[in-house]
Image: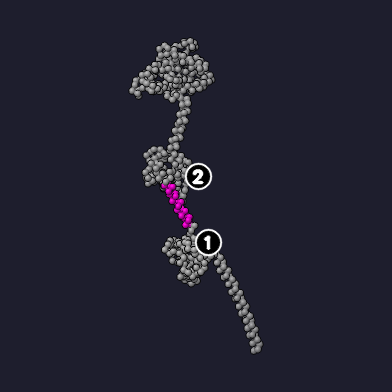
Amino acid sequence: MVEGFEMDIDEAKKLVNKIADLEKQLKELQVQSQKQIDESLSKYRRVINSTSEGYLELDLDFKIVDFNITILKLLGKDEPMLLNHSIEKLYEKSNIFVHFANRNHLSFEATFFTGNGEKIPLLLKRSIMHDNKGKPCGYLVLLTELTELKKAQENLQQAEARYRIMYKNAIQGMYQCALDGCFLSVNPALAKIFGFENTHELLHRPGGVASLYKNKKDRQPLLEALQKYHIVKNYEVEMQRDDGRPVWALINARLAEDSQGLSFIEGILIDNTEKRIAEEKIRQSRERFRHLADHDNLTNLFNTRYLYSALDRLIEESNRTLKPFSLVFLDMDNFKHVVDTHGHLNGSQALKEVSTTLGEGLNTPAFGVAYGGDEFVLVLPDTGKEGALKQIQEIRKRMKQTIYLKDKGLEVRMSASFGIATYPEDSDDREGLLALADEAMFRVKNRGKDAVGLTSACGSQGCGPIL
């Protein structure tokens, strides 16, 4: 019995020691668990304090039981002003804009009061919290400052308003259209450029922007460039108004996408018609000046400046090719009587009509020259004396058969005296050729007019037939 009792005591000691070890381990586990809990709480606190959003924890009566540092800074309040106070006292309940609401979540904008009496716009997002048994135990609230967002929205609204004003009042045409040309929007300036009374008429025009092109194929290069480069600058094209009148347009456009990813075209169109007309007038003026540099303003025949340079070229060519050319001087017969009878204006008109007769009787490369007053020179390249005589007789006949100044209600008939000289048969230089043709013409004048005089080798002695 004693020995058994002693064994029971030993067992008891072992049991006591084991219990003590277990108690020690339990205490260590409690310390370790508390440490982990403290670390988790610290980490949790660091997280909620580092967020840029205000954090509140509410009980089921909407009283504040916890919060982060951010909310103190956001509202400019201290702990006593928040803790155990209802959140509903922090904002204007009469001015709420709800974004979303259901059984477990609520989101709305409201104006909150700060500690110094100012007001700030905040976005409140509230979610219900549940305990381990799934029962509601409170609410989690996040608050986001909307001041900068509101400013950005206001700036955006102002920018949109300015754009709408600019779009409406711009002097340039502005538009949006689908790739098929159907208008999506147009401003008043575009409607005005194309002769429409309002934007509605242009927006609903059959064919859209494509119908405004003078040549519908001219739109294709613009489309191809947009699809390749997504932007086109200074594309000039001829278009047309609603009444058919031409419009020269300068287009700057870009390819854009809407919210659904569909491509459309945004463009600015400048009416370049006046500039184009001005440029065309300048071009025509330059051409006119170039034309007047070697043409007579009244008759539109070449002038003496052109004659002298042309004769020099013909002499060089004749020397190279050994082909002759002929020169004809002609002077209108009794032209002073036409002027004295019908006036200077009709006299000038008669000379214009004579120049037409001469032009009709010449074949390229032959040409006529207004030499001065009622005198003309005809130059016949690659033509000898016989060919020149035949051609001049035809011109002389045509002139005699023509009635001049008919458009003035008059019937005037005229004739001329002609003198022919041929290079190199009659002279081997420009001045000699001109002088011989002039002398041959004056012999005709002195012997009755209305005939053709030929130059012969005796030249200045006055010989040579008159035909």
Residue plotted at (47% across, 60% down): 121
User: Which quadrant would the N terminus be assigned to in this image?
Assistant: bottom right
- Residue assigned mark 2: 229
Kind of element beneath mark 1 = loop
Residue 274 picture location, percent across and down: 43, 37
Kind of residue sitting beneath label 1: Ser
Q: Which residues are magenta?
A: 149-168
- Residue assigned mark 1: 52
Indicate whether 146 appears above or below 464: below
Task: State the residue lying farthest toward the bottom.
Answer: 1
Residue plotted at (59% across, 74% down): 30
Examine the image and state in which quarter residue 339 appears: top left
Residue 166 picture location, percent across and down: 44, 47
Query: In the rendered view, how is the structure colored?
Result: one colour
Let me know if residue 424 appears in the view. Answer: no
Residues under labels 1 and 2: Cα distance?
A: 43 Å
Sequence-first tag of 1 and 2: 1
Examine the image and state in which quarter residue 445 appears: top left
- CA neighbours of label 1 inside 10 A, class few (<14), some (14 to 19), many (20+): some
Kind of element beneath mark 2 = helix
Residue 51 picture location, percent across and down: 53, 62
Q: Nearer the viewer, residue 59 or 313?
A: 59
Does the magenta-highlighted stretch encompass residue 235?
A: no
Indicate whether 440 appears above or below 352: above
Q: Nearer the viewer, residue 112 or 267?
A: 112
